[in-house]
Amino acid sequence: MITQENACYKNELWCVYELKDAQGNYYEETRLKMRKASQNNEFVCPDCGEYLVLCAGNKVEPYFRHHENANCPVRTNGQGSRHLLARRLLFQAAKRSFPNAEITCSRQGGKYISDIFIKDGNMKMVLEYAGQDVKLELWEKKHAYYKEEGIMDLWFLNGKKYADDVLATFEYLIYSNQGIILLLDMEDQEIRLKQRCTIPFNQSERVFTKSFKLEEITIDPSGKINCPFETCKNQFIEDVEEILKSKKRAYQYNADSGIFDKNPYREREAEKESVQKIVQKSGEVIEVNREHKRLHMEAVKEREIRRDGGKNFEKDGTPRQGTLDDKLHRRSLTSKDGPLTVRMTAIGESWDLPQLKGNEAMLPKASTNRKSYLESLNLKLQNIQDRKKQELLISKAIEKINSELKIYSWHCYKRG
């Protein structure tokens, strides 16, 4: 889009941003008047003398455009819509600050174009908006040019892009030259001032930021923004000072009262020691379970060797998968019993129990509960004389032992 903000109207330079108020609303009577003037070819380009067309719709900021076949030597591609909005806001701030000054937009000065150029007597000032980072070398050249020409340059940055308290590189470059960061917040139509300050209490450095409505501020000829920023900054320094002093008083009180003589980390150390003991005890339990499992497997191996000559074991002594501990084995009562053997003295037998499977941490209690169940069965069998009743109880018990091979089921077993 080719844009231009200035036009000659009735032998005077007129800026299209005169159509709007500070809130961005059109002066409708003025817009109607200027549309008629545009249709009557009353707007002339100050650079080439050709007629300009006024474009003053509601979607983008108003602007002038040349006719299609115009040949203006200084016509340039216009900025994006956000840059146009920033330029209008800065133009209106300039008009409030210097009502009698000559103010133009997009002014060609030497080899550079400034967003807003202000000339008030001998005072010359430009207002520049940087929506994105400018190449540092280009900015330095432009700043040096303005300084050489006796033009004061104030730079306004994108408030959304530079929202952090920490200064970015481009911000630091601007700050080192103008002593303050000026951030333009176009959505809220505010200006946000950012400046470093030193806290006298401990000589620490903070960044103070404060926002003001654009319509409430003006710019003086020295480039200072007229607003209560300094008052707010001094209050901020006092508040931080008071907070730091309060913290020091509290620290001194604790020191005087002997709190620091006590161990503030004693509870944490005690908790740490307790955790270490639990971890150590858990390690001991794991070792006991491993030893229990080793003895268990040795007993299983011995039992299998007695029963079938050890055909269920590999040459290295490890059991073949799927061949062990799936059934209860009954044999005559002997004195050679292992950890998986229960002596059923009421019927003159030794029962070799199947291996339990599951969470090994529960294995000791599960094995104990299973043996208690069979010991209770042994007592019942001693008190029953009827052989058929004995066999019925034995069958139910063997079925229970062979079907319940999970450690968890015996771990939770409660004797009836």
Image: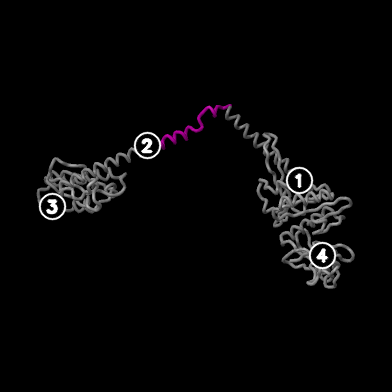
Residue 246: within the magenta?
no
Three-letter code for the amino acid on which mark 4 is drawn? Pro
Identify the residue shown where x is 76% and y is 66%: 2
Chain-order first, disc 1 or disc 3: 1
| Local SS, label 1 | helix
Q: Residues within 10 Å of mark 2 (few under 14, many from 20)?
A: few
Q: What's the CA distance linking mark 1 and mark 3?
A: 105 Å
Three-letter code for the amino acid on which mark 3 is drawn? Glu
Q: Is residue 248 left or right of residue 103?
A: left
**Residue contact between numbered discs 2 and 3, judged by CB atoms under 8 Å:** no
Three-letter code for the amino acid on which mark 1 is drawn? Asn
* Disc 2: which residue: 280
Q: Main secondary structure of the magenta part?
A: helix
Q: What's the CA distance linking mark 2 and mark 3?
A: 48 Å
- Residues shaded magenta: 256-278
Q: What's the CA distance linking mark 4 and mark 1?
A: 34 Å
* Disc 4: which residue: 73
* Disc 1: which residue: 177
* Disc 3: which residue: 391
Residue 272: within the magenta?
yes
Q: Nearest the camera: 39 or 218? A: 39
